[in-house]
Image (cartoon, rainbow, N blue to C red):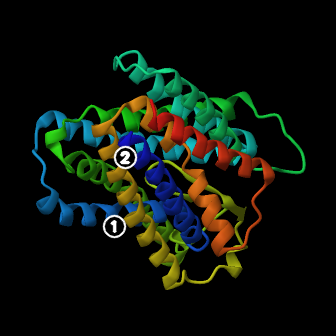
């Protein structure tokens, strides 16, 4: 099935976007990275809209804007649960929930049906999501109930994003994605402006509102997190003005995210929400592969197994 292939490629591109988002978050606050990526994506989509077209209807505009709100909610909840930890458990919980919620919607409310290959592929994809998103650590820490609820809430919000996009008509073209970025950029830019206002009123330099603070976790407008590059931020006195490369990484993140969103949109128009959501949830694969190639980071055995299962799931779902 063509939609399964497009969704799987889109998942890898989502992971690439998260990789660059994580790199940008080494020097910029994650909310700043998110705002820059959202604005970049909005500009790119507005440039592509006259070429690719799209009919503006109230329903499609509303669903697109709602998807953007879901994205911001996902970011907020994901950030909160990752701060509580442990990330090695809460990250897969978020990813699996983000896959299961649209799957259930599509197979029940959406009236979708799959053959035996499809159901087998969905099961393997869920296992792959857990293995790929798992971050091995020295010890396993039991997560708190609050952290688990936040992780589930973040996954449901990501699922809400996909369900909202799936409700739009084929005639709308890129309109839903444009509205997604309008809503997302509006909210995140307001947050950044508030940070700047609070910072300047306290007599602190403007740059301190843009620099990383606390735990560095890469974040993108989709609500994904780059967990492979999480580390404590340096002390305030050691944080210099963000270099230009961090802004460039944030812009690249926005471009890649638009590409992934567009592929997800096409996959949804061609195929089933249940299949597309399961494959899209494999986005950490792209981050892991880029980290291994660019940063020479070690890929854990459990993650290699997850990558292999992801490919197997893609083949089965393509046959569904």
The image quarter containing residue 287 is bottom right
Report the side of 63 relative to 141 (left or right): left
Pointer 1 local density, CA inside 10 Å: few below 14, some 14–19, many at least 20: many
Q: Residue at x 43, y 71 (%)?
A: 252
Residue 253: horizontal and vertical position, in percent? 45, 66
Report the side of 256 relative to 177 (left or right): right
Q: Which mark is residue 264?
A: 2
Give the spatial CA distance, label 2 vs label 1.
18 Å
Q: Residue placed farthest to the front in the image?
A: 319
Q: Label 1's element? A: helix
Report the side of 174 relative to 215 (left or right): left
The image quarter containing residue 38 is bottom left
Nearest to the observer: residue 111 or residue 315:
315
Q: Which mark is residue 40?
A: 1
Residue 162: horizontal and vertical position, in percent? 39, 37
Pointer 2 local density, CA inside 10 Å: few below 14, some 14–19, many at least 20: many
Q: Quadrant of the C terminus?
A: top left
Q: Quadrant of the N terminus?
A: top left
Please count the marks in the image.
Answer: 2
* 310 lies above or below 37: above
The image quarter containing residue 88 is top right
Q: Residue at x 46, y 70 (%)?
A: 250
Residue 265: horizontal and vertical position, in percent? 31, 45
Nearest to the observer: residue 101 or residue 200:
101
Please indicate, yes or no, whether residue 151 appears anywhere in the rendered image. Answer: no
């Amino acid at each position: 099935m063509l939609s399964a292939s497009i969704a799987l490629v889109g998942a890898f591109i989502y992971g690439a976007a998260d990789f660059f988002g994580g790199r940008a978050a080494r020097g910029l606050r994650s909310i700043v990275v998110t705002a820059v990526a959202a604005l970049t994506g909005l500009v790119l989509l507005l440039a592509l809209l006259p070429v690719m077209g799209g009919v503006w209807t109230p329903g499609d505009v509303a669903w697109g804007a709602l998807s953007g709100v879901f994205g911001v909610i996902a970011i907020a909840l994901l950030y909160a649960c990752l701060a509580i930890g442990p990330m090695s458990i809460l990250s897969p919980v978020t990813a699996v929930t983000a896959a299961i919620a649209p799957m259930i919607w599509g197979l029940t409310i959406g009236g979708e049906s799959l053959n035996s290959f499809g159901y087998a592929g969905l099961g393997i994809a869920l296992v792959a999501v857990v293995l790929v998103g798992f971050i091995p650590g020295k010890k396993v820490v039991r997560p708190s109930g609050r952290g688990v609820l936040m992780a589930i809430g973040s996954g449901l919000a990501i699922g809400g994003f996909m369900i909202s996009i799936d409700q739009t008509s084929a005639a709308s073209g890129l309109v839903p994605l444009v509205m997604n970025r309008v809503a997302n950029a509006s909210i995140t830019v307001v947050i950044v402006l508030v940070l700047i206002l609070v910072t300047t009123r306290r007599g602190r330099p403007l740059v301190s509102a843009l620099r990383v603070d606390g735990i560095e976790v890469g974040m993108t407008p989709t609500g994904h997190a780059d967990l492979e590059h999480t580390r404590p931020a340096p002390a305030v006195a050691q944080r210099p003005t963000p270099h230009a490369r961090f802004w460039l990484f944030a812009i690249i993140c926005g471009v890649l995210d638009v590409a992934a969103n567009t592929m997800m949109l096409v996959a949804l128009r061609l195929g089933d929400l249940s299949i597309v959501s399961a494959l899209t949830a494999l986005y950490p694969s792209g981050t892991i592969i880029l980290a291994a190639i660019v940063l020479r980071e070690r890929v854990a055995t459990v993650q290699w197994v997850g990558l292999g299962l992801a490919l197997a799931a893609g083949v089965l779902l393509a046959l569904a």
